[in-house]
Amino acid sequence: MQATIMPSTTTALFILTLLYLCSLSASAENEGLSMNFYRDSCPQAEEIIKEQVQLLYKRHKNTAFSWLRNIFHDCFVESCDASLLLDSTRRVMSEKEADRSFGMRNFRYMENIKEALERECPGVVSCADILVLSARDGIVSVGGPHIPLKTGRRDGRRSRADILEQHLPDHNESMSVVLDRFANIGIDTAGVVALLGSHSVGRTHCVKLVHRLYPEVDPALNPGHVEHMLYKCPDPIPDPKAVQYVRNDRGTPMKLDNNYYRNILDNKGLLIVDHQLATDKRTKPYVKKMAKSQEYFFREFARAITILSENNPLTGTKGEIRKQCNLANKLH
């Protein structure tokens, strides 16, 4: 008869300790983003951000477009850590000043939101979470869906201007490159089509579209729309500082809706990427589906924004909570 070997008390305690440490390690890995992260440390945080976004929108309608663009430009580049908001230093250029950030503005109003939070809960709410939640509330301001988003991000300490172009797709790149860049952060083709629906609101500077008008008009453009574009962009070499823009959607320019998809199917997209979205065999089926159903567009848009907002955040003890959104604490 084979004897049963019972573990000693010391061995049993050792095993239990290992199991406990493993559970702590797993817990630490999951201690990242969560819904209502500030419920105890700053219960009014999300309401304060919402109030500030609404107040700013009443005064400056274009702030909502800025918040939406912020989440794309910040979270797409390695980490959702508010590196976008950092000012340039003597040694490092700000992401805000990179070519891909042309036309971005209203960064100073992020400080309004930060100051309101600092009055209520000093040193608690990160600029990364402000950036994400202001985008969420800005989307609602322009008629889009409310998207429940997790919080708990911490702020990065350095600009990523030097690697911006390795991550952010350009509006003139091929659809293959665009789809690959999005796939790198977990966003599929339907999500790409939905996120580009952000072009439903705001406007595009003539600098970004004159190559479709001069020296010859792009034959892919709707002739009826070309007249309006030429009127808004009369110069082949526009001044980047001049107020020369074309509304992305002339029908509902201040509303996030599926009219964008009907426009690009009618060859009224301003940018090359808009045209490609409506003609590429990989994306066109989703464009047609979103043109027919705003509900489907909003569902895919919310899913893609959620994935984008959770791209490699700094959590736990990583990073910092900035005192000012435009400065790392060591420079404050």
Image (spheres, helix red, strand yellow):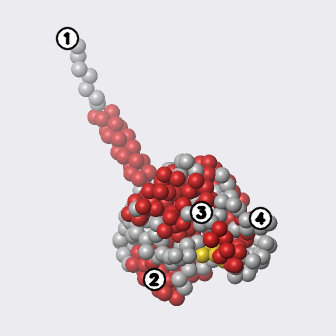
The x, y position of residue 127, in whole percent, is 53, 71
Q: Which amino acid does label 3 sit on?
A: Asn
Q: Foreground residue, 316 or 201?
A: 201
Write down the residue under mark 2. Answer: 54
Q: Which residue lies furthest to the front in this view?
A: 223
Q: Which dot, 4 or 2, sits closer to the camera?
A: 4
Q: Residues within 10 Å of mark 1 (few under 14, many from 20)?
A: few
Q: Which dot, 1 or 4, sits closer to the camera?
A: 4
**Residue 248 located left or right of residue 15:** right
Q: Which amino acid does label 2 sit on?
A: Gln
Which residue is depicted at the point 58% across and 50% down? 280
Above-or-below relation of 53 to 268: below
Which is more N-terminal, label 2 or label 3? 2
Which is more N-terminal, label 4 or label 1? 1
Locate the N terminus by quadrant. Answer: top left
Write down the residue under mark 4. Answer: 216
Q: Which dot, 2 or 1, sits closer to the camera?
A: 2
Write down the residue under mark 3. Answer: 267
Q: What residue type is labelled 1?
A: Met
Write down the residue under mark 1. Answer: 1
Secondary structure of the residue carrying tag 2 is helix
Determine the CA span between mark 4 and mark 3: 17 Å
Determine the CA span between mark 3 and mark 2: 34 Å
